[in-house]
């Protein structure tokens, strides 16, 4: 029975859609940054995004499931 419960937990999780300009946070290091490019080739679609992390000079390709969206401040 445990296997069916595990299957249900990952099968209902929808991948997050990222867009250029989205603010994101790395799930492990908690570094924040902004999405600069969303890969659209079939091999990379929904798997990698390019993120410019705060304090860094260049964007890096990261697995989309290693970051989460963060809300932007409303003024």
Image (cartoon, rainbow, N blue to C red):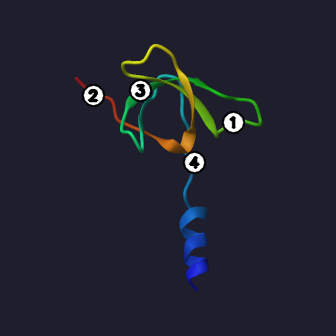
The mark closer to the camera, 1 or 3, is: 3
Which residue is tagged 4?
15
Whole-percent x, y for residue 45 in the image: 69, 36
User: Dot 3: few (<14), some (14–19), or many (≥20) neighbours within 10 Å?
Assistant: many
Q: Gap between marks 4 and 3, in whole Å?
A: 19 Å
User: What is the residue that sits farthest to the bottom in this orientation?
Assistant: 1
User: Dot 1: few (<14), some (14–19), or many (≥20) neighbours within 10 Å?
Assistant: few
Report the front residue among 26 and 5. Answer: 26
- 44 relative to 22 in the view: left or right: right
- 9 relative to 48 in the view: left or right: left
Which residue is tagged 1?
45
User: Dot 2: few (<14), some (14–19), or many (≥20) neighbours within 10 Å?
Assistant: few
Circles 1 and 4: CB atoms closer than 8 Å: no
Which comes before the other along the chain, label 2 or label 4?
Answer: 4
Whole-percent x, y for residue 39 in the image: 66, 28
Could you tell me which residue is drawn at 38 percent across and 39 percent down? 29
Which comes before the other along the chain, label 4 or label 3?
Answer: 4
Dot 1: element: loop
Which residue is tagged 2?
73
């Amino acid at each position: 029975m445990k296997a069916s419960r595990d299957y249900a937990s990952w099968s209902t999780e929808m991948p997050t859609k990222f867009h250029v300009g989205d603010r994101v946070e790395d799930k492990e290091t908690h570094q924040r940054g902004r999405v600069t490019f969303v890969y659209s080739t079939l091999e990379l679609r929904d798997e990698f995004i390019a993120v410019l992390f705060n304090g860094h000079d260049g964007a890096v390709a990261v697995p989309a499931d290693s970051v989460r969206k963060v809300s932007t401040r409303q003024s």
